[in-house]
Image: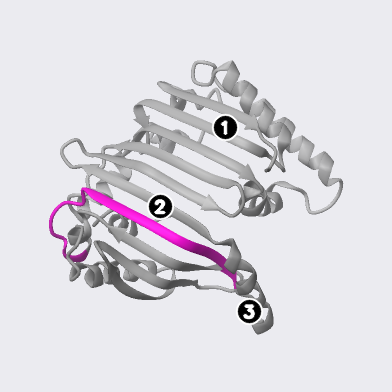
Amino acid sequence: MIRAGLLGLMLAGPAGAAELCPAAWEKVSAALSELGSVSGTLSQDGDWCLVQGLVLDLEGQYLPDWHLDRLRFRGSALGWIAEGAGTPEGLEIAVEGLRLVVQTGNAQMDWLFAAQARPNGIDAQASLAWDAGAKVLRLEGLSLDFPGDNLVEASAVLTGVDLSSPGAIQMSATSFALTEADLRITTHGLFEWYALMTLGPAMLPPEGDMEAAAEGIRADLRTVVAELPETSVSAESKAALVALIGELPNPAGDLVVSVRAEPGLGPVRAAGYAVTGMPGTLAEAAPLFQGVTLDVDWSHVDAP
């Protein structure tokens, strides 16, 4: 979970103004230091603030440390990050060579893991824009380019977002609503590398027939899909989800997801469950689907 203070720092940035980069990076690195020690070399690259050799060393053994060759950021909100001045109307972020490196405490293995991770860097970029008058935050372009033929692209629109002050940001954490979201995932090993080893231990039994257990999970997922309201999820989208489930744990292809919600998905819509408790069935969760449409397409594509 991203803390509100860190979220506020990251949703900010003015172009140029080289004197703002050190102050902005000081604020951002201070927020990141809540997670672990931060190191890197700051410089200016045109109107970009550039941090090279960035390392976020997470506290705790076996937690993967974040290594970035280069982090760039610029935008009209740098002054807001650095000095609390102006409005955070836009921010661009670009990451080159992100690697997740596990540290075991064994010097030999740590060196080997770091060397193994180096040719498998992740590049990413994102663009955020905030309309202060409408209180609308737009994720206009998120792209995560993973090694091999693996890619995640996303865009989204959030309403009820006020970034005008720290207090307003905290209030937005309870009032925002997602009205639009589009996601495209190309996976040829992406699921196995970044999700399977997290989900597997939580969902599979510690011993026994693993393939039978996996089929049981797939059957449960197909039941959930069948029970989704067709007013929100069409028969075609359900068929796409069933086809994707059938390929687990080795899906290969393109997943496209589009969400539209009126008046939006957010804390307000779920507030009633704070009193009644979380819904135990999809029927009980019906209010969450009102005004929501979910379109899904899955195309199997063999790895090139």
Q: Earlier in the sequence, mark 2 or mark 3?
A: 3
- Few, some or many residues within 10 Å of mark 3 (<14, 14–19, 20+): some
Where residue 80 appears, x then y in whole percent? 19, 59
Give the left or right position of residue 201, taking residue 227 as reference: right
Q: Which region shows up in magenta?
A: 82-102
Residue 263 versus residue 156 in the image, above or below: above
Point 72% across, 36% down: residue: 247
Residue 286: give x, y in percent of width and height.
Answer: 49, 23
Q: Is residue 24 visible?
A: yes
Q: Name the residue under label 2.
A: 125
**Mark 1 crowd level (few <14, some 14–19, many ≥20, 10 Å Cα):** few
Q: Residue extending furthest left?
A: 86
Depth check, front residue: 204 or 299: 299
**SS category of the residue bearing label 1:** loop
Q: In this view, does 92 lie to the left or right of 258?
A: left
Left or right of 152: which side holds 215? right
Dot 2, crowdedness within 10 Å: few (<14), some or many (≥20)? Answer: some
Instruction: Measure how far apart labels 1 and 2 are at the Cα level.
Output: 38 Å
C-beta proximity under 8 Å, tags 1 and 2: no
Q: Which residue is depicted at the point 63% across and 80% down?
A: 105
The answer to which quarter of the image holds residue 6 is: bottom left
Q: Name the residue under label 1.
A: 280
Mark 1: which amino acid?
Gly
Instruction: From the top left corner, tell me how far across and down residue 238 is, in percent.
Output: 61, 22
Classify the position of the N terminus by image quarter: bottom left
Report the magenta stretch's main SS: strand
Q: Looking at the image, which residue is at 32% across and 71% down?
A: 30
Q: Which amino acid does label 2 sit on?
A: Gln
Q: Name the residue under label 3.
A: 111
- The answer to which of marks 3 and 1 sits earlier in the sequence is 3
Is residue 243 located in the magenta-colored stretch of the structure?
Answer: no
